[in-house]
Amino acid sequence: MTEIFDEVAEAHLIQPTFITEYPAEVSPLARRNDVNPEITDRFEFFIGGREIGNGFSELNDAEDQAERFQEQVNAKAAGDDEAMFYDEDYVTALEYGLPPTAGLGIGIDRMIMLFTNSHTIRDVILFPAMRPQK
């Protein structure tokens, strides 16, 4: 589903746009929505056809997090290169308790892409040694 969004919609989000209510299966660290548990309390912010930021309420339920990590492990085994690993230490920490928490990440490299009208993040990465190989 995210691949379809990336190919069909993302390039057309020219004006500042928030996309909200991401499906739980593509948001392994985000808290499920209280009204509809199939979606999460997550958003992404787009300008000029590019994702600039990402934010969400942190998942603080250890059982739910363990299940989602296992789904990610299964996805990785099925060939999903972007799937996460199972972080047992994180699940253990959640078992001790995490108060309601949220975060927002705005990529400086993505802002530079916007300001310089670059089409690939490889052109603006600040640390060339960390640039992905072409």
Image (spheres, grey):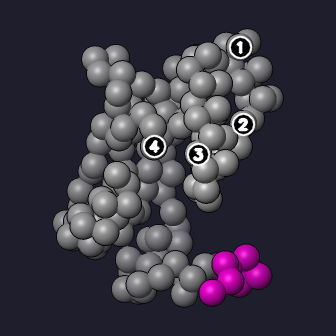
Of helix, strand and loop, which one carries label 3? helix
> Residue at left 24%, top 67%?
8
Is residue 86 rendered to the left or right of residue 80?
A: right
Q: Position of residue 81 (x, y in %)?
A: 62, 59
Q: Nearer the viewer, mark 4 or mark 1?
A: 4
Q: Decide whether the magenta segment is chiefly helix, strand or loop.
A: loop
The relative height of residue 27 versus residue 117 in the rendered view (above or below) is above
Residue assigned mark 1: 95
The crowd level at tag 2 (other Cα within 10 Å; few <14, some 14-19, many 20+) is some
Residue assigned mark 2: 86
The relative height of residue 85 versus residue 64 in the rendered view (above or below) is below
Measure how far apart labels 2 and 4 are at the Cα level: 15 Å
Q: Earlier in the sequence, mark 2 or mark 3?
A: 3
The relative height of residue 33 versus residue 21 in the rendered view (above or below) is above
Q: Nearer the viewer, residue 77 or 124?
A: 77
Residue kind at label 3, given as amino acid type: Ala
Measure how far apart labels 2 and 1 are at the Cα level: 15 Å
Question: What segment is highlighted magenta in the picture?
Answer: 126-134
Of helix, strand and loop, which one carries label 2? loop
> Residue at left 23%, top 56%?
17
Q: Nearer the viewer, mark 2 or mark 1?
A: 2
Indicate yes or no whether the magenta region holds residue 130: yes
The crowd level at tag 4 (other Cα within 10 Å; few <14, some 14-19, many 20+) is some
Residue kind at label 4, given as amino acid type: Val
Measure how far apart labels 4 and 1 are at the Cα level: 23 Å
Residue assigned mark 4: 26
The crowd level at tag 1 (other Cα within 10 Å; few <14, some 14-19, many 20+) is few
* Disc marking residue 75: 3
> Residue at left 63%, top 33%?
69
Looking at the figure, which quarter contains the C terminus?
bottom right
Q: Earlier in the sequence, mark 2 or mark 4?
A: 4
Q: Earlier in the sequence, mark 2 or mark 1?
A: 2
